[in-house]
Image (cartoon, rainbow, N blue to C red):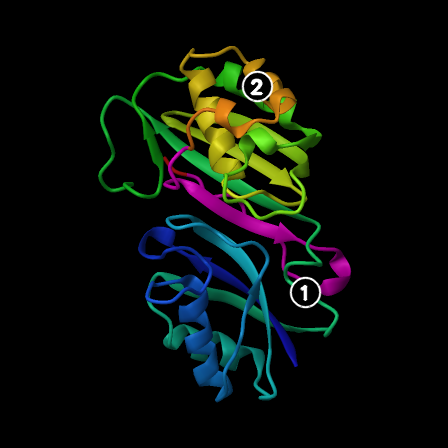
Amino acid sequence: MRIAAGIEYDGDGFCGWQRSPNVRSVQAELEKALSKVADHAVCCVCAGRTDSGVHAQQQIIHFDSEAKRPDHAWLLGGNSALPKDISIRWVTAVNEGFHARFKAEARSYRYVIINQLVRPAILAGKVTWVRKPLQVDAMQQAAQYLVGEHDFSSFRAAACEANTPVRHVMLAEVTRAENFIYLDIKANAFLHHMVRNIAGVLISIGQGDHSPEWTQQLLQKRDRTQGGVTAPPDGLYLVSAHYPEKWGIPRSPRPIVFG
C-alpha cells in the first residue's frame, strides 16, 4: 500500500527534514515512528525538504508498506511514537501513482516578521525580529517583480543542487497586521534558501536601504553575490504542497497567524 500523510513540525530542534548521520532530523524521527507501526523499515518521501530551524504546517509525505493498517492506526500509532515537536495531522491511502514530490503542482510558504523595538521572548524561533521600522508598501511593490517565470540565480544558495534556477512564482504578497508582517509566496518549486534570500532582500527594501526596483535588478543580474543577506530560518513555515484533486489530498491549512 502507498500511504500519504500531512505532517506538522516545529523546526527549532531539527537540522532540517533530511536524514543525516549524527544529527536530529524530521525524516529520521518520522521513519522510526512509522516503522514501529508497520513492523518493518519505512522510508518517507516529502514534498519539499526544509532547512534547519524551518517549520511546517503541512508537509506532505508518502511511504509504502506491506502492512495492512487502518488509517487511524497509522495516525494514532505514529503519533504515540513521535516526539512532541512532530505531529501527524492526517493519513490516507493513495494510488501507487501518487508521489509527494513529483506530483505536487506547487508549494506555498509563509515568512513571519515581528517588527518592533524589543526582541520577542515567547515567539523566539517562531518569528524573525526586525527592530528598524519596515515600509510594507515598498516591500509589496518589490515582491511583485518576482511573480512569473524567472531565473532566480540571485536568490539561490551557493550549495543549491537544482538542475535549473528557473522557477515560476504564482504569488508573492507582503501584508501587515499590527506588529506582524507576513510574506506569502507560492511557486511550482523552490531553490535552496530561495524564500529566505527573498525575505532578506525585501527586509532591506523595507528598511529603505534599496528601492523596490532592486528586486528586478537582482533578477536580471543572476548573481547571488549581489543579492544581499539570507534572512534567518526563524519565522519560515512550509504551509503546504498542492496537488490535483484526483489524488484526494486534504486541502491546505490557513497560513499561521500571530497577534
Asked where in the image residue 154 lies, by quadrant, the reply is top right
Residue displayed at 53% across by 42% down: 109
Above or below residue 243? Residue 164 is above
Position of residue 37 measured from the top left corner of the image (x, y, whole percent): 47, 84
Q: How many labels does the image show?
A: 2
Query: Do tag 2 and tag 1 residues touch (Cβ < 8 Å)?
Result: no
Q: Which residue is drawn at 39% across and 50% down?
A: 52
Q: What element carries label 1?
A: loop
Mark 2 = which residue? 142
Numbered mark located on residue 1 in the image: none
Question: Label 1 crowding class (10 Å Cα cut-off): few <14, some 14-19, many 20+?
Answer: many
Q: In which quarter of the image is the N terminus?
A: bottom right
Q: Give the range drawn in magenta.
A: 231-257
| Residue 49 % position (x, y) | 52, 54
Q: Is residue 85 above or below residue 173?
A: below
Q: Nearer the viewer, residue 95 or 158?
A: 158
Residue wearing tag 1? 99
Q: Is residue 144 among the parts visible in the rendering?
A: no
**Residue 97 seen:** yes
Give the x, y percent position of residue 131: 29, 22
Q: Residue at x 47, y 16 (%)?
A: 205
| Image point (47%, 81%), residue name | 35
User: Quadrant location of the C terminus?
Assistant: top left
Magenta stretch mostly in which secondary structure?
Answer: loop
Rate crowding at label 2 as few (under 14), some (14 to 19) or many (20 or more) other CA atoms within 10 Å: many
**Quick one: label 2 or label 1, which is nearer the N terminus?**
1
- Image quadrant in which you'd find residue 148: top right
57 over 184 or under it: above or below: below
